Image: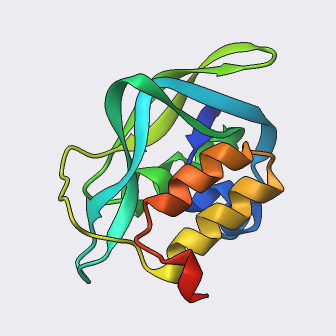
């Protein structure tokens, strides 16, 4: 059966979330790094909150998870994120480089923040999958949440 690679960097870092969205279970391959892009919460949701996005950035990299996905699930990805393009990018893993599909949008807005439930899903998936704590702290800093208020 045909398969493709997918680079997850947002809510799909939470493997249980991704599994609940697909017909077949994805195969988690490894931690991956997308160079020359930066993680942002700058895609405007219709409710006024922000969704995660990646933007070209010469001096940044985005951590994520590389998955192998059944071709039968490609349709889910193509319709699940309106406003994003599902495009292939080269990602680095401990076992080599892969061309993996990921979501990128040119539709961006500054000064918006994600819902707490959304960024907590990203943070949970990142922790469970071994993304570096310093990187996760950078994501937390972009949420607009005040950790002193917790």
Residue shown at 56% from the left, 47% from the top:
9
The quadrant of the image that shows the C terminus is bottom right
Tell me: residue 48, above or below residue 88. Answer: below
Task: Answer left or right for 40 relative to 119.
Answer: left
Specify whether 73 is left or right of 127: left
Relative height, residue 145 to residue 95 (above, below): below
Instruction: Please give left or right for residue 49 compared with residue 5 in the image.
Output: left
Q: Position of residue 124 (x, y in %)?
A: 72, 66
Residue 47 drawn at (x, y percent): 26, 83
The single residue placed furthest to the front in the displayed view is: 148
**Looking at the image, which is closer to me, 149 or 124?**
149
Above or below, 30 against 12 in this view is above
Residue positioned 52% across, 46% down in the render: 74
> In the figure, residue 45 lies in which quadrant?
bottom left
Q: Is residue 21 visible?
A: no
| Residue for point 81% across, 15% down | 95
Residue nearest the viewer, comparing 125 with 110: 110
Residue 76 visible in the picture: yes
Q: Give the quadrant of residue 1.
A: top right
Q: Position of residue 18 (x, y in %)?
A: 66, 61
Q: Residue at x 23, y 78 (%)?
A: 46
């Amino acid at each position: 059966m045909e398969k493709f690679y997918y680079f997850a960097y947002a809510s799909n870092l939470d493997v249980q979330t991704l599994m609940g969205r697909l017909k077949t279970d994805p195969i988690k391959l490894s931690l991956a790094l997308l160079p020359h892009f930066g993680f942002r919460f700058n895609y405007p949701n219709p409710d006024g909150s922000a969704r995660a996005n990646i933007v070209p950035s010469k001096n940044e990299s985005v951590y994520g998870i590389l998955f192998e996905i059944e071709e039968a699930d490609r349709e889910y990805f193509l319709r699940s994120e309106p406003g994003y393009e599902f495009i292939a990018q080269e990602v680095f893993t401990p076992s080599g480089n892969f061309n993996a599909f990921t979501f990128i949008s040119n539709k961006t807005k500054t000064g918006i923040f994600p819902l707490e439930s959304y960024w907590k899903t990203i943070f949970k998936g990142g922790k469970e999958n071994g993304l570096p704590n310093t990187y996760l702290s950078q994501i937390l800093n972009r949420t607009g949440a005040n950790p002193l208020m917790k």
